[in-house]
Image (spheres, rainbow, N blue to C red):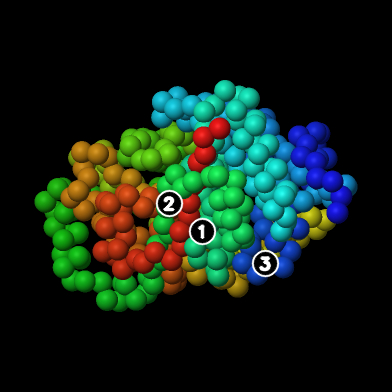
Amino acid sequence: MDELQVKPVKGEGELNKFITFPWEVYRDDPYWVPPLISERQEFLDSEKNPFFEHATVEYFIAWRGDQIVGTIAAFTNDAYNTFQGVNIGFFGFFEVLDDPEAASALLARAEQWVRDAGHGSIMGPAQFSTNDEAFLLVDGFNDSPRALMTYNPPRYMSYLDAAGFEKAKDAWAYQNDIYEFVKNAPPKLVRVTEKIMERRKLTLRAMNMKEYDAEVELFKKVYNSSWERNWGFVPMTDPEIDQLAKNLKAIIDPDLVLFVEYEGEVIGASLTILDLNQPLKLAYPRPGTPEIFTMMKLLWHWKVRKQVTWVRVLALGVLPEFRGVGVDALMYLETAKTAARKGYPMGESSWILEDNDMMTRAAEMLGGEVYKTYRMYQKQV
């Protein structure tokens, strides 16, 4: 076996190798969903991703001779540290073949980078924050991930354990049989949500795509205000939210984006997205295949063959002064009814922190059950 070397990524060519390495890791994995290579290139482009406006990132590749056996990134997220009042570095993009030595060396290199940057601890995996794809899958490996959720081999847990990482926080994904729930929705729940709207003088509406930019501003206000006390939260900057809104605009179903208003002011909002991982997996992007062909396959499986059977509640928030009265249940119930009407039988609510009692109660009240667990790890450096 060739000697192992972990080196920083140099140049565009090596960065593209960094991006496409997961195709080696998941070559025979039936559950992995490959990303669009162009999307990954843009996401890691410091000129195009607004995350880099408040972050410093370095990528590393583990080599055995001329073969890549693993990757990792280490980075500082200044926005996170400022908002949380901490001094933490992060790691992400941790992918490695069945090679414990390489895994150990990659994690050690990320720790060294974080230590050299002046941080007292390291946390991850995240790419790049809890506003993007984050957490390691630790339970529920016999299923593909829903859109914008993570997936990894079970062996990654043992690599992190061996390197001395410990659990920082778990997050859960709940699944719902939407058709079953809507068909058998408890009459009491329906009555309670109707009374909430009547007594609180609330109105519920879907997103107006003709006023898309203004609607994004309303969602931005609720998102940053309602999530600010959550563990691991960092407010999205205006450019980050604008970038997300731009990326979602072409694929969003406005009927699944809900606003709750009180006296004309938005006090709650939810964003549910289609699980485009299903048609994406069937299209199967891969290095060397022109992406135009992949996009044609994606559209075929999505629009023509109707291969989307899942939706994912990506974000749901209520302003603090309106919590505890059932506004969250109101949005969940309406989302389920709309999804059922539009032909989506299954739903995922994710991710929900293990100690977010308000959200876990709402998910369970609506018939959800935990079917996947994700973990954020941390270590003193």
Query: Where residue 87 sits in the image (x, y, percent)?
Result: 48, 27
On the picture, is 123 further left or further right than 329? Answer: right
Query: Where residue 17 sits in the image (x, y, percent)?
Result: 79, 46
Mark 3 vs 1: CB contact within 8 A: no
Circle 1 residue: 138
Mark 2 vs 3: CB contact within 8 A: no
In three-dimensional space, the C-alpha distance between marks 1 and 2, rounded to whole angstroms, equals: 9 Å
Circle 3 residue: 29
Query: Where residue 199 sits in the image (x, y, percent)?
Result: 11, 51
Mark 1 vs 2: CB contact within 8 A: yes
Q: Circle 1 — which element?
A: strand
For disc 3, the neighbor class at 10 Å (few under 14, some 14 to 19, many from 20) is few
For disc 2, the neighbor class at 10 Å (few under 14, some 14 to 19, many from 20) is some
Upstream in sequence: badge 3 or badge 1 = 3
On the picture, is 192 further left or further right than 343? Answer: left
Query: Where residue 268 sits in the image (x, y, percent)?
Result: 30, 45
The amino acid type, in three-letter code, at marker 3 is Asp
The amino acid type, in three-letter code, at marker 1 is Val
Q: Quadrant of the C terminus?
A: top right
Circle 2 residue: 170
Instruction: Please identify, in this view, whether the residue under mark 2 or under mark 3 is nearer the observer.
Output: 2
Q: Circle 2 — which element?
A: strand
Upstream in sequence: badge 1 or badge 2 = 1
Q: Nearer the viewer, residue 227 or 101?
A: 101
Residue at point 18%, 71% (across, down)? 187
